[in-house]
């Protein structure tokens, strides 16, 4: 066990994140641009079966996070999944996971910047494409240069805003169903039967349409493992990390399944515009423009939250890689607030590619599809490495598993099932024209 390596890696990082910070960081990282901006396309591709898409992915993500949780808590010298992959699978695996994860979060940040520009165009259609992205990068970089506790506080309120908005959307949808609201565009009455009674039923575009929605749906879950990175700066990880992971199923049901079900009961799936966020569009169609602006503001905050969490993660990942001697030494330096400032600023510089991409040919949704594909594939490889680490850990260190207070349900068998699912997802990506472009 490379205890010296692990102790060294986190010199200077402070355990100032409380339980409420970690819980909301977990939500904020998982509920971002993919849910709000990408859900229109997933509904268009899969119809009502998109609900099953999110349930299926969420089911397997829960077990992957349980594997990560058991590994992190098996030895608190593991501060992130790069630590245990480095220790269990070798330095090459740690190098691959660390740099891949850093790259993926940079790409997610670019996707969020692209999405932010789209949301700003809701209010100002003629705004210069470069302005929103550059402004947001500067603001978020400034936030992340402050103490980790303040970062956690900001993320807490960002995520709380999203939670309130989604619960509000679910309650509003339930009210519209009860009063028999009629869509002024399609003339359709709000009804739960839209989920199965429209032409084509629950799988209107067949199994191929159902699987085509996986790419954007996977993107909505990227960042769910952010709790594994934040655990290094969290008080009482034995209590707080399991609490964050164990709430994944209820988050999937409330924030993905119920929200999308409400959208499709108020607006039939075949009427949803795949190029427009259905969260904003639903309130616009019922004639409440102020509410639409408020929802757009929440969606904007969601994208900012996701990008902000990515900045936190990339900075800490580069810091750890530097302390492992697989990144430039300057990235291992901290500022007076205990923040890895050089690593953070280096990562933020790459986010400026977002505004540049917006000047290329194609719509914002087309750009969004390409960048989400790249990040989704990268994250799948990271999750695969987490599962491989768990499988080898069970073989190498059975005594740690036996003593674990947070065992992965299903153990090695479930780890192999999750691996098979992720490999199948990669196959689906290779069969889709949009994802092949990525």
Image: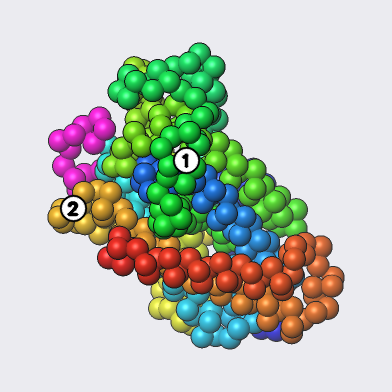
Image height of 330 relative to 252, above or below:
below
Q: Between 49 and 380, which is closer to the camera in this rendering?
A: 49
Give the residue furthest to the top. Answer: 179
**14 left or right, relative to 393:** left
Image quarter where the N terminus lies is bottom right
Q: How far apart are marks 1 and 2 (CA)?
A: 32 Å
Q: Which residue is drawn at 25% across and 30% down?
A: 123
Left or right: residue 282 versus residue 323 is left
Range drawn in magenta: 121-132
Tell me the element at label 2. Answer: loop
Q: Is the residue 320 above or below the residue 230 in the image?
A: below
Residue 144 against residue 297 in the figure, above or below: below
Query: Residue 105 at what x, y percent from top left?
Result: 42, 61
The answer to whether residue 169 is seen in the rendering is no
Q: Tell me residue 120's x, y (percent).
A: 27, 37
- Compared to residue 433, the image places residue 250 above or below, namely above
- Location of residue 289 in the rendering, given as x and y in whole percent from the top left corner: 32, 20
Q: In which quarter of the image is residue 232?
A: bottom right
- Determine the residue positioned at 40% across, 29% down: 267
Residue at (38, 23) in percent of width and height: 188
Nearest to the observer: residue 50 or residue 437: 50
Q: Which is nearer the N-term, disc 1 or disc 2?
A: 1
Q: Is mark 1 on a helix, strand or loop?
A: loop
Apparent side of residue 32 relative to residue 231 in the rendered image (left or right): left
Q: Nearer the viewer, mark 1 or mark 2?
A: 1
Q: Residue 362 carries which label?
A: 2
Q: Residue 201 carries which label?
A: 1
């Amino acid at each position: 066990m490379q205890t010296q390596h692990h102790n060294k890696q986190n010199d200077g990082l402070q355990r100032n994140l409380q339980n409420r910070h970690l819980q909301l960081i977990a939500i904020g990282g998982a509920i971002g641009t993919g849910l709000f901006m990408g859900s229109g396309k997933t509904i268009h591709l899969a119809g009502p079966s998109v609900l099953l898409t999110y349930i299926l992915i969420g089911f397997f993500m829960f077990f992957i996070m349980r594997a990560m949780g058991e590994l992190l808590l098996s030895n608190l010298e593991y501060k992130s999944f790069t630590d245990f992959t480095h220790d269990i699978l070798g330095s090459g695996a740690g190098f691959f996971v660390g740099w891949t994860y850093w790259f993926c979060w940079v790409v997610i940040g670019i996707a969020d910047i692209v999405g932010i520009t789209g949301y700003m165009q809701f209010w100002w259609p003629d705004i210069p494409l470069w302005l929103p992205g550059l402004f947001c990068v500067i603001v978020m970089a400034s936030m992340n240069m402050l103490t980790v506790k303040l970062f956690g506080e900001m993320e807490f309120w960002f995520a709380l805003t999203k939670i309130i908005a989604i619960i509000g959307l679910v309650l509003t949808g339930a009210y519209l169903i009860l009063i028999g609201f009629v869509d002024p565009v399609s003339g359709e009455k709000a009804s739960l039967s839209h989920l199965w009674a429209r032409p084509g039923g629950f799988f209107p575009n067949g199994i191929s349409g159902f699987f085509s929605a996986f790419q954007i749906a996977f993107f909505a879950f990227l960042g769910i493992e952010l709790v594994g990175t934040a655990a290094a700066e969290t008080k009482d990880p034995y209590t707080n990390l399991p609490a964050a992971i164990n709430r994944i199923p209820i988050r999937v049901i409330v924030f993905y399944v119920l929200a999308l079900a409400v959208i499709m009961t108020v607006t039939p799936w075949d009427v949803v515009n795949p190029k427009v966020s259905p969260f904003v569009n639903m309130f616009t169609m019922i004639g409440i423009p102020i509410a639409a602006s408020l929802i757009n503001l929440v969606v904007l905050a969601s994208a900012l939250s996701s990008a902000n969490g990515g900045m936190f993660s990339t900075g800490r990942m580069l810091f750890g890689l530097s302390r492992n001697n697989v990144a430039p030494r300057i990235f291992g330096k901290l500022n007076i607030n205990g923040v890895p400032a050089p690593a953070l600023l280096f990562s933020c510089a790459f986010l400026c590619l977002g505004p540049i991409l917006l000047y290329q040919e194609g719509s914002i949704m087309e750009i969004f599809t390409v960048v989400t594909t790249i990040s989704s594939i990268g994250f799948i490889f990271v999750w695969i490495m987490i599962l491989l680490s768990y499988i080898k850990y069970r073989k190498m260190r059975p005594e740690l598993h036996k003593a674990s207070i947070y065992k992965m349900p299903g153990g090695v068998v479930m780890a192999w099932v999750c691996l098979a699912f992720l490999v199948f997802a990669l196959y689906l990506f290779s069969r889709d024209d949009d994802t092949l472009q990525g």
